Amino acid sequence: MPIFGLGTWLSKPKEAGAAVKHALENGYKHIDCAQLYNNEAEIGEYMSQVWKAGKVKREDIYIVSKLWCNDSAKEDVIDACKLSLKNLQLDYLDLYLVHFPTRLKKSVGTAVSGEDENSLIGYSPEMMKETWQEMEKLVEMGLVKSIGISNFTTKKVVELLEFAKIKPVCNQVELHPYLPQNKLVEFCKQKGMNTFDEFLHFL
């Protein structure tokens, strides 16, 4: 995983794809995407232009996407990944993350939060086990090379490791001088997991 990359969160329509294209043409090797960001189709169009131009090869770029909370039920995980792949015009992802450990109802769509009590299903180790087993299938199917998590606390990482056959390669969290999260970082390091900042490393 290249340590420095371009994040696509909050990128405006008609700007996200152009920014990714410019980044790839100027040496960026890591692009961070997510279903939640609602711009994967646009990014896919521009990345396709880059591959076709021939100066940058797909296999040299590390591309990440994330499973949103309303797609974490057993029957939705694989289809959600396939949709991101379709939108990004890719055959595989280098890394696919569980965006948050919280589950939302399917009807919520890509809302940023589940503050409405009627939209929130919540979290339990049993639900996460169901989600993670489907994530592991994505690796077996060759749709993703690696799987990981995002915004997980130490407690939730511990619970996941109790049943994970494929250990998450990373935990993407908010991590900076104002929020160093030393204990979480050290714990993940002990478990052989990378931690990286989803904000400051993606400027």
Image: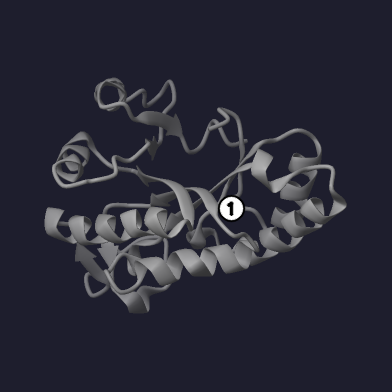
Q: Amino acid at mark 1?
A: Leu
Q: Is residue 110 visible?
A: no
Q: Is residue 139 visible?
A: yes
Q: Which part of the image, by quadrant, shows the C terminus?
A: top right
Q: Quadrant of residue 202?
A: top right
Q: Residue at x 82, y 56 (%)?
A: 52
Question: How far across and how far down the image is residue 95, in percent?
Answer: 48, 46
Question: How far across and how far down the image is residue 89, in percent?
Answer: 65, 63
Total marks in image:
1
Question: How far across and how far down the image is residue 6, in percent?
Answer: 63, 40
Q: Quadrant of residue 111?
A: bottom left
Q: Residue at x 47, y 56 (%)?
A: 142
How many neighbours does mark 1 have within 10 angstroms: few (below 14), some (14-19), or many (20 or more)? few
Q: Label 1: which residue?
A: 10
**Left or right: 67 as drawn, with respect to 84:** left
**Left or right: 96 as drawn, with respect to 104:** right
Q: Residue at x 75, y 40 (%)?
A: 23
In the structure shown, which secondary structural element does the residue marked by tag 1 occupy? loop
Q: Quadrant of residue 12?
A: bottom right
Question: How far across and how far down the image is residue 159, in percent?
Answer: 14, 43
